[in-house]
Amino acid sequence: MSPITQVLFRRNAGSRRGVAGLLPAAAVLCLLAGCGSNTVGALNYGDNARKAYAEALDDFFDDECIQAEPAFRNVRRLYPYTRFAALADLRVADCLYRDSKYAEAIQAYEQFARYRPSHVEVPYARFMVALCHYDQIPSEWLLSPPAYEREQRDTHEALRMLQRFIVDYPKDPLVKRAQRMAHHALRLLAAHEMYVARFYLDRDYPVAALGRLHTLITTYPTSGYEPEALLLLGETYLDLKQDDQAKRAFRELRQRYPKSTFTGAATDHLARLGG
């Protein structure tokens, strides 16, 4: 079972351990009291939904989404007025995610959150939208360019969704994982900005490089690339004969990151500039 599945089913009321207890207490009392045929029919309806969901869930736990996904869809179709219909919708989204059908999974999770805004599993659905984007972030491969050189659309979207999740659900059990993921995405985006800035400088486009460096410093704080970016920012201003702006960058570097390996170069530049 994947780590995300383990997290999911520890917190989900539809797990093997919890699914047997989902029959409403009022229904049990009514059964014991001998209610009428309509109530018995309602009990059968709910019990059948529970059994169908439990069987589909068994397949899901056994990594058999080929069987589980259509079974969950049947639960949703046949028992739309039970709590299992919503859980089945969420499990269909999980199957799509497990099959790396990210676009379809994102749509399914977003629909779940949109149409059931008060459901207890909305935070999980929101996290999974972010995870779908996160899993598409460029990774390092032996024969491919470094991850920071490649398209970062999903990195941007993953960071945005993770930051929203952290703010909206600060006490959710998945927040710590979301924070680690967000930091990785932030560092990758900062590295990409540094790469593009140097790309522009190598081709003699210093003004474009300045824009990328400012973006790195202001948009991706705590990335760890700020000292290097400030030094490069100051040196680019020096090349443009904008000494006051260069001094400002070097002073900020020295003040904010006194122990950085880049601070010595900034101090040398300031000495040559007279302060």
Image: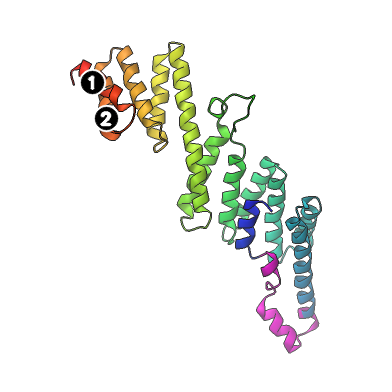
Q: On the image, numbered disc 2 is attached to which residue? A: 254
Residue 78 is tagged as none
**Magenta region, residue range:** 14-39
The residue identified by callout 1 is: 270
Label 2 neighbourhood size at 10 Å, few (<14), some (14-19), many (20+)? many
Compared across the picture, whether 24 is left or right of 168 comes to: right
Mark-to-mark CA distance, 1 and 2:
10 Å
**Mark 1 vs mark 2: which is more N-terminal?**
2
Tell me, what colour scheme is on the image? rainbow
Asked which quadrant contains residue 266, the reply is: top left
78 lies above or below 199:
below
Picture quadrant where residue 122 is located: bottom right
Say which amino acid is labelled 2.
Answer: Arg
- In the rendered view, does 20 fall on the left or right side of 110? right
Q: Quadrant of the C terminus?
A: top left
Residue 268: give x, y in percent of width and height. 25, 20
Residue 254 covered by magenta stretch: no
CB within 8 Å, label 1 to label 2: yes
Q: Is-magenta flag for residue 35?
A: yes
Q: Position of residue 188 (x, y in %)?
A: 50, 33
* Kind of residue sitting beneath label 1: Leu
